[in-house]
Image (spheres, helix red, strand yellow):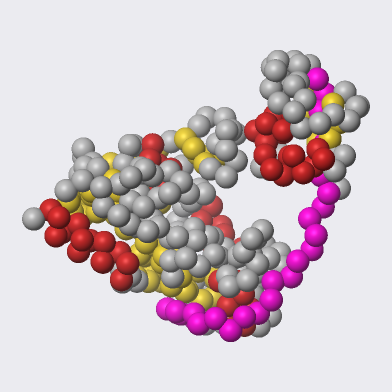
Amino acid sequence: MTEHRLICNENGIRLDKFISVADVGLSRSAAVNLIENSGVTVNEKQVDKKHRLSAGDVVDLQIPDPVPYEAKAENIPLDIVYEDDYLLVVNKPKGMVVHPAAGNYDGTLVNALLYHCGESLSGINGVLRPGIVHRIDKDTSGLLIIAKNDFAHAHLAKQIKDHSFTREYEAVVFGNLKNDEGTVDAPIGRNPNDRKKMCVTTKNSKNAVTHYSVIRRYKGYTHIKCILETGRTHQIRVHMAYLGHPVAGDVVYGVKNEKVAFTGQCLHARKIGFVHPKTEEYLEFTSQLPDYFNDFLTKLNNISK
């Protein structure tokens, strides 16, 4: 059981909304569920989800511990770019979730890794994320590095923390970028109005830096390369939307009714580079743009003639 005590600093906000925007990791629906299951009190009294708070109210939460879940091995084909006794690099297809979570307990990259590697995966991130050093979104394709033991995991994680880990992406963004290259240096944190989304904010955020350069311009769109200096959740998607040029097909941060129809976001983790934890040799891998990406570029080329 995890307990939190929150102090309200405004009048009139609904209890369920107040909890969802607080930094306790609960969505609004999860907050409602907690209230309805007697996990919330206001000034030591039970109230309903529609209760309006006043400044100074004391809100106590008792959040039950998550039910343990152990990911299961599944015989799912993997596109393995490199593998040795310490790590492997995989090319994740668009549409595959990296690790099990609510609503996606099967068919994930972790399920496939458990079948391929057995127990030879690092345990630092627990039973739901064995071997996972970093992540990419479900609808982002491309390269990921997986650690087979805790030594490799810690070594690789330190490189990410020290910004010495090479991560290069290609994306198609909406609109015509003004400059041929640039840097977005803007902190990213949880969106206070929607905890499923991230945003550029100075509140409860972490620094985030994305370098971009134009590969080719099309009518209404721009093909770009992005190099990550940091690795925040949804970083490229949030930063490009912040510039007013969201990733094509991004249903969360993107433009509604885009000029060219596209299913899912056009974002690919093209290159990854790191120092091998054992040999200390720098390794770098590149994956070809997948069919969905090339097909979209062809469509853009045809309408730009």
Decide which of 52, 189 is in the foreground and name it.
Answer: 52
Decide which of 223, 125 is in the foreground and name it.
Answer: 223
In the drawing, does residue 276 fall left or right of residue 14?
A: left
Location of the C terminus by quadrant is bottom left
**Is residue 185 placed above or below 139 in the rendered structure?**
above
In the drawing, does residue 77 fall left or right of residue 7?
A: left
Q: Quadrant of residue 269?
A: bottom left
Residue at screen point 25% across, 47% down: 259
Decide which of 176, 157 is in the foreground and name it.
Answer: 176
In the drawing, does residue 177 fall left or right of residue 56?
A: left
Q: Quadrant of residue 72?
A: bottom right
Q: Position of residue 186 (x, y in %)?
A: 43, 36
**Is residue 70 placed above or below 2 in the rendered structure?**
below
Residue at screen point 80% across, 20% down: 57
**Is residue 231 placed above or below 7 in the rendered structure?**
below
- Does the magenta segment cover residue 141? no
Dominant SS type (magenta): loop
Q: Which residues are magenta?
A: 57-83
Q: Position of residue 212 (x, y in %)?
A: 30, 48
In the drawing, does residue 298 fall left or right of residue 2?
A: left
